[in-house]
Image (cartoon, coloured by chain):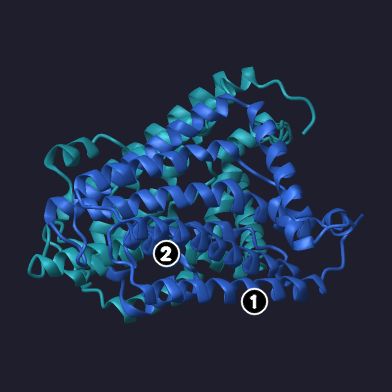
Amino acid sequence: MKRYFEFYRAMMKLSVLEQWQYPIANYFYMIGMIAEPVIYMVVWSAVAVQQGGMVGGYTPGAFAAYYIVWTLVRNMNIVFTPYGWEWRIRQGQLSMSLLRPIHPLHGDVAYFAGWKIVVIILWLPLAFVLSLIFKPELNPTLLEGVVFFFAIWMAYLIRTMTLSLLGMVTFWTTRVSALFELYFAAELILSGRLVPLSLMPDWVQRLAWFFPFRWAFGFPIEALVGDMSTNELLAGLGMQLAWIIFGAVSVSLIWKVAIRRFSAVGG
Amino acid sequence: MRGLRLAINYLRIGVLNEFQYRANFYIQILQTFIALATGLIGLNLVFSQTNELGGWNKSELLAVMGVFIMMGGVIRSAIQPNMERLMEEIREGNLDFALTKPADSQLLVSVREFRFWQVVDVLTGMIVMGVALSQMNRFISLWSVLGFFSAIVMGAVMIYCFWLVITSTAFWFVRVHEIANLFEGLYAAGRWPVDIYPNWLRYGLTFLVPVAFAVTVPAQALTGRLTLQTWLGALALTILLFTVARAFWKFGLRSYSGASA
């Protein structure tokens, strides 16, 4: 246990130091990312205004709150991509991490968790500017704030697990980009990234309950922005935890089978 | 004339190269299909709640989406791959190999790559536009056709100039490949006509990142909204941007010191 703790601390420190070297590059990346929610926000605010100030229970101010919190959650959603797994496996880069006496996934989790700290610090001024421009209506209770804090880190873990699983498909076939694209499209629709799920048709909302997407995206946002009861908040955290456990178990099971197929030399 | 021949030769090599990887063609079709499907879902979600957005109705916005997809194909086939390669070469110091060739350096770095399969996006965009036009059921004059094609060309040139300026900053900042991400994010704003955005953003999308000229203006031509004023403005801005981009490229080149080679 202590060994893991030391590893995580060292790895996170390393990634903070490394990423802090490139604030401009990180900002470019974040501004590119922020364009997306700003577009959604503007479009839906325009629709809300045209419909007499509200659409699907959201006022322009509520949309602003939703999509500004969105930007933070989206950043928390950045994990080692399946394309990275593809590269790792195809190029034999995995060989190096296999020599280490620790599961490679720990390295990913720790590195990106460290990066998140840099990202959150860089995000604060952006959120401040966005709030000045779009005037969000946001009055979270203390409980919602606490739930949100845990929910974004759990969202990070859920997405780490699901994307690692997706990336590990590369062990069996190297033509994976089409599969990845399909996954990301489903995620866009069913997670609450494109629009708050409450604006979707009923059946889509019910369908979304069974996929990991909304637990890694829409739920943390709604926890802070929406009016969820204490029970709903706790149930959401429970679903997140369930997905993390399910994901971690699947990753380790599939890893055991997959690693036997890995045949690269060098790297 | 020699420059044109050079560009055509590179184009041919690019196409031949891509023909070696036919499976990529099917992957491209799938990707285009997914992008189109998500775009249509977004459009339908908006229009399930309203029947007009910023003075544009649904079939007119479908035309905007068609232009958006088509221009995206042009960018990803001819502009972005060249600029990404350039960025990489500035960083690695391999640009020496291009600079020592006896041709105009800006021309050379702008025509070396061509991703042929992206043509699927261009065709899909045209089909979407065709569907939108038939839904609108209005007479298309020769002027709007000419306006449309000239606006597309000017828009593409402006986007190219924007990319060249941004890429040239690699001479000073070195690690700039996040710019591709930045551009894709901002370009996505073109999915909707820029009229719907608040003023500051509209100006940004018009003059800083010329998305408005690349997508909205050609779509205006298709839907009969393009005024002569806008067209002349586009022409002036194209010339201005091209001059600025070329000057900036030459200025940046002076800071290039090579890294290895």
Q: How many residues crowd mark 1 within 10 Å: few (<14), some (14–19), many (20+)?
A: some
Q: What chain is colored cyan? A: A
Please provide percent x and percent y for residue A163.
Answer: 47, 38
Q: Chain of mark 2?
A: A
Q: Chain of mark 1?
A: B
- Mark 2 belongs to which amino acid? Ile
- Does B42 sit above or below residue A149? above
- What secondary structure is found at the residue carrying circle 2? helix
Along the horizontal axis of the image, is B61 left or right of A149?
left
Q: What chain is colored blue? A: B
Residue at 82% across, 74% down: B254
Residue at 23% across, 52% down: B139
Which residue is nearer to you in this view: B208 or A164?
A: B208
**What label does residue A34 carry, if any?**
2
- Does B235 sit above or below residue A260? below
Q: CA distance from mark 2 to mark 1?
A: 28 Å
Residue A61 position by quadrant: bottom left
Residue at 63% across, 45% down: A3
**Residue B67 in view of the camera:** yes
Residue B247 position by quadrant: bottom right
Q: Marks 2 and 1: same chain?
A: no
Q: Residue furthest front?
A: B142
- What secondary structure is found at the residue carrying circle 1? helix
